[in-house]
Amino acid sequence: MSRQTVFQKLIRDTNTVLRRLAAGPHQTDWTVNWGDLACRQAGAGIDDWGNPFTAVWVEEVAPDNPGFQAAVTAGLADLGWPSVQVYTEW
């Protein structure tokens, strides 16, 4: 599977997790625009300590939403994507 195909699958799987979260029940303290919620980017790299990482970026969620980010991370782990970093942005 090509790198591009892997990232496209990660985006699709992230959007699956987001749909499941939107279907609820979910935490009421999450600041989320449920109508436009979507993963638009996925990528991988190496941090400044030389550690590899994989990450997704989810739009329409407040950046300071650690509970939401943890729920997406757990949902991705359930789908076979361990240790994905989740970033949220408006």
Image (cartoon, rainbow, N blue to C red):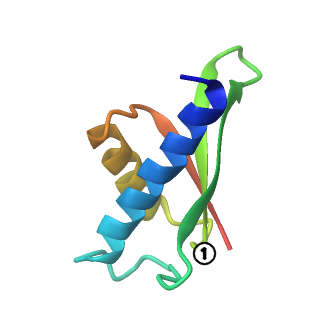
Most extreme residue toward the right, as rendered? 48
Q: In this rendered view, identify the residue nearer to me: 2 or 18.
A: 2
Residue at position x 38%, y 58% from top?
16
Q: In the displayed structure, does residue 56 sit left or right of residue 13?
A: right
User: Which of the image's four quarters has the C terminus?
Assistant: bottom right
Residue at position x 27%, y 41% from top?
78
Q: How far across and down, in percent of the image, does residue 8 sit?
A: 57, 43
The number of discs equals 1
Q: In this rendered view, identify the residue nearer to me: 50 or 12.
A: 12
Most extreme residue toward the top, as rendered? 50
Which residue in the protein does label 1 denote?
60
Looking at the picture, which amino acid does disc 1 mark?
A: Glu
Mark 1 residue crowding within 10 angstroms, few (<14) / some (14–19) / many (20+): some
Residue 23 image-quadrant placement: bottom left
Q: How far across and down, in percent of the image, does residue 77 sit?
A: 33, 38
Work out whether 51 lies above or below 27: above
Work out whether 82 lies above or below 52: below
Q: In the displayed structure, does residue 35 sit left or right of residue 87?
A: left
Q: How far across and down, in percent of the image, does residue 64 sit?
A: 58, 66
Most extreme residue toward the left, as rendered? 25
Q: In the displayed structure, does residue 46 sit left or right of residue 75?
A: right
Residue at position x 77%, y 22% from top?
48
Work out whether 28 lies above or below 85: below
**Label 1: element kind:** loop
Q: In the displayed structure, does residue 51 sit left or right of residue 19?
A: right
Residue at position x 50%, y 85% from top?
35
